[in-house]
Image (spheres, rainbow, N blue to C red):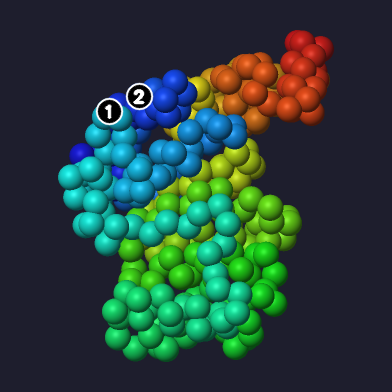
Amino acid sequence: MTTEAAIRVQGIQKSFKDLHVLRGVDFDVAAGTIFALLGSNGAGKTTLVRILSTLAKADAGTATVHGLDVAANPGEVREAISLTGQFAAVDEVLTGRENLMLIARLRHLKNPGAIADELLDRFSLTEAGGRKAATYSGGMRRRLDIAMSLIGNPPIIFLDEPTTGLDPQARIEVWQTVKKLADAGTTVLLTTQYLDEAEQLADRIAILHKGTIIQNGTLSELKQLLPAATVEYVEKQPTLEEVFLTLVGDTGETDTDDADRADSAAKAGKESR
């Protein structure tokens, strides 16, 4: 990666008493790209995002965001970022437009009404802008949440499992929103446990397992880690799911259904060979 990485993480460690959550994490995120941090529940994804967004302190290692050390310059880092958590943080009593205007006023920006109208249009929420957020669908609420995060035009946005609990259509709506952010030059660090989400969105994917990054690369690079299976002379490229399960292995951290699927995938591979 270039020396002008928007996010740089080097040797980050974090423990909670005897629980070692992060054991030396390293990666760079290029400006204007979508970087997916992929891992199972409990892998340390949210802990790392909390450190990068100055909500928690690392035990060791360094991290810079927008060229600023997160430990030495937390205030300046907060001005350069926005964080969208796992659950939409909208006020359901207010309308969509009122939610946006509230955040604009809290950021001491001029013309909060104009800012709200521009974001409602940008996120295809103009018609719903006058309705209370409580009436929004899951996808609309999440889009409003992301729109609120963009007030003030932060160059870097952290999305912590943004599609958790959403139905397929709502997930697609959020995916389209995230792609538009990157197209407009925003750097996006996305955490997810959904393999298809990483496949659809990310320019680069890092797999976080047991507190360390065990692989980091483009989708194409990760797929090359497994040989292509050949069935009746038709080349079958490995999926990201097969790469993930092979790298992580059967650690007992997945549920029974995940273990059964991994076992079936392994048997299918043997039969094809």
Residue type, numbered disc 2:
Gly
Which residue is tagged 1?
Answer: 60
Q: Residues within 10 Å of mark 1 (few under 14, many from 20)?
A: some
Residue for point 46% across, 70% down: 148
Kindly give the residue lying farthest to the left in the view shown: 72
The quadrant holding residue 244 is top right
Nearest the eye: 92 or 267: 92
* Relative to 79, 87 lies left or right: right
- Picture disc at residue 149: none
- The answer to whether one can see residue 131 in this image is yes
**Quadrant containing the N terminus in the rendered view:** top left
* Relative to 68, 256 lies left or right: right
Q: Residue 140, how many percent across, how many down? A: 63, 70
**Quadrant containing the C terminus in the rendered view:** top right
197 over 154 or under it: above or below: above
Nearest the eye: 50 or 222: 50
The quadrant holding residue 272 is top right
Which residue is tagged 2?
Answer: 24
